Image: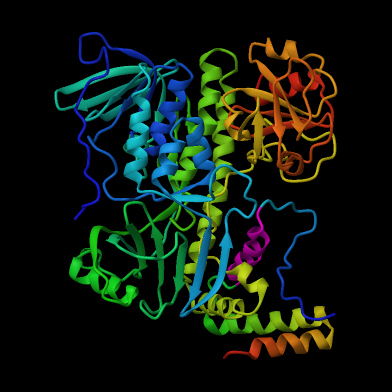
Amino acid sequence: MSLITTPNFYKTGKRYFRDFSPNDDFYEMLIDTHRDLSDEQSNMVNAKLILLLANHIGDMDVLAEALAAAREDL
Amino acid sequence: MLKTYSYPKFDFRLPTGAGGTKVPRYPAVVVGAGPVGMAAAIDLAQQGVPVVILDDDDTVSVGSRGVCYAKRALEVLDRLGVGDAVVEKGVSWNVGRTFFQQEEVYNFNLKPNADQKRPGMINLQQYYLEEYEIDRLKAFDNVELCWKNKVVGVEPEDDKVVVKVQTPDGFYTLETDWLIVADGARSPIRSMLHLDIDGKIFMDRFLIADVVMEAEFPPERWFWFDPPFHPGQSVLLHRQSDKCWRIDFQLGWQADPEEEKKPENVIPRIKAMLGDDRPFELEWVSVYTFQCRRMNEFRHGRVFFVGDCAHQVSPFGARGANSGIQDTDNLIWKLKLVMDGKAPPSLLDTYSAERTWGADENLMNSTRSTDFITPKSKTSLTFRNATLGLARKHAFARALVNSGRLSVPCFYNESSLNTPDRDAFSGDMVPGAPMDDASITVAGEDGWLLDHVGNKFIALVYAPDEAPSGAAELAGLPIPVTTIAVVPAGAKAPQGMVAFEDVRGTFAKTYDAKPGSTWLLRPDQHVTARWRSFDAAAIRAALARATCNA
């Protein structure tokens, strides 16, 4: 398995009539999670989020790919 | 300023019977001769209802204002007899490009499946649309368009609405069975009735300029995040007709609207954007803020709110005028059935239920776009710029880039008027769906499906091997249902049936058609029920449900 970089958001059982809907649903959840937090708190939330998701993915090869992609073009 | 367009000036007049000693009574009055109010009036007039339109002004929209008209609005305007004029004058487009700093990061095509009559979007200055609607209204002898008639009082009663009107000749009072309010975002009538509209104002300001110039840019929507010529903010470019271009600069909340509107401040911004010495002229400039909000209910007894007075969204997505036109599309057939005593007044509550659902979808999408375009915190900005950065290389990030999700028609898939599926179908044409167009041939003539449906209930039956039993009875109901066959290319319909020939197979594919499949269509071109076989009893039950007669 390699890193998925095509659109991949979905919700089980939910019918979407527009391609952009699941992406926008996720983005709104993400931004809402940070609502009313200080910058420092937001950084902490982001760090925890990465750790939670990384453990969920588990596959070291996928994680290595994602880590490298995130460092590109800084 | 304003060189490409000369504004008509309309004469003041009173509606017939007004101003005398007797209070006149009308079946329907529309307040507001904007694009939405006039769409409502045309729809009523087409169905034979006499209409009085009252407007406090004496000309069309000043400045280009609503510019983008989406495919669904064009389809409604086709049904109203205005579509051709609008599309001919407008600039058709389907492609939008989004740039981050210097690079294109994302593009979209509104109409990837091309077998539909209308483009994804056209750009046309609002005053042209209004002019064409006024022309169309002249075709009816049951319409009175009354300029310089300002509504100053509204008293709803059980069996009528009493309206007080101010004119250059003084005041008069009228009574109407039904009042359609299309008096815009600041809606004086909404205030007169002490009705709330809840939502939020966005803390940002935008400069819009209509610029006349020779330019070779293609007819596409171009959107920049953080471009070198306007760092840290967004810019939007649209081509309109008459070599008139709409440019929209994000300014930030601190900007002084009066200063920003001055030509000496606007011109350098445009020069920086164009990056060359091409000549241009400023035609119209405005600085705006916007709110995202809606009324709780769009029906209040005999008073209906349509368009901006009922709901307002951010302009990113062209969901303002387009959704207002969909409001009238939804309302008028229901109102006509109630006026004729063929449906109970509860059908009118479904106008509010379906269109508040539509408004919520528009509010959600335009608010999301605004949050992406103008991030409200450092973290939001970081995520936004990370998305744009990843979008250069990764498809998933391009799908997250949100520079506006452009107006598409609402699916009333949870409406109480729908008959839930009993049979299995695939595809998007579910009960409540706005119909997708398809090329068809009717009696040897090439045409389009949506030009042949609407204004009445229709049962479409695919590839029937004999004339469906019960079709004649359906045609004779108080609310008649016309049965029409859709046949594959080259096939014939059973004797005596009107047939739509699905020449390219688009219908069969989009609607998941199999021989015998049947769809019940509403007068506003939405699917309300479907089955795998023609069943007259099921159609009668679905018709009753779709008109609150069940």
Task: State the predominant SS element of the stretch in magenta.
Answer: helix
Task: Tell me where residue B78 appears, x and y as whole percent.
Answer: 50, 34
Residue B275 included in the magenta stretch of the image? no
Q: Residue at x 76, y 46 (%)?
A: B427
Describe residue B198's horizontal placement relative to residue A8 as left or right.
left
Looking at this view, is B216 or B47 the one in front? Answer: B216
Image height of B251 relative to B423, above or below: below
Q: Specify the quadrant of the image occupied by residue B353.
A: top right
Residue at left offset 22%, top offset 34%: B58
Quadrant in the rendering for residue B307: top left
Q: Is residue B102 left or right of residue B475?
A: left
| For residue B243, above or below residue B139 | below
On the rendered image, what quadrant is the N terminus of chain B found in? Answer: bottom left
Image x and y of residue B216, in percent = 38, 65
- Residue B508 seen in the figure: yes
**Residue A27 shown in magenta:** yes
Residue B431 spot, x, y in % from top left: 71, 36
Name, please, the residue furthest toward the left: B169
Residue sitting at x 74%, y 11%: B472
Q: Residue at x 81, y 41 (%)?
A: B425
Quarter of the picture holding the C terminus of chain B: top right
Question: Which region shows up in magenta?
Answer: A18-33
Answer with the quarter of the image where residue B118 lies: top right
The reply, left or right, for residue B161 in relation to residue B387 is: left
Question: Is B260 placed above or below B231 here?
Answer: above
Residue B186 visible at all: no
Left or right of B338: which side holds A58?
right
Number of callouts:
0
Colour style of the rendered protein structure: rainbow
**Residue A52 at x, y = what percent?**
75, 80
- The correct choice, above or below, for B289 with respect to B28 in the image is below
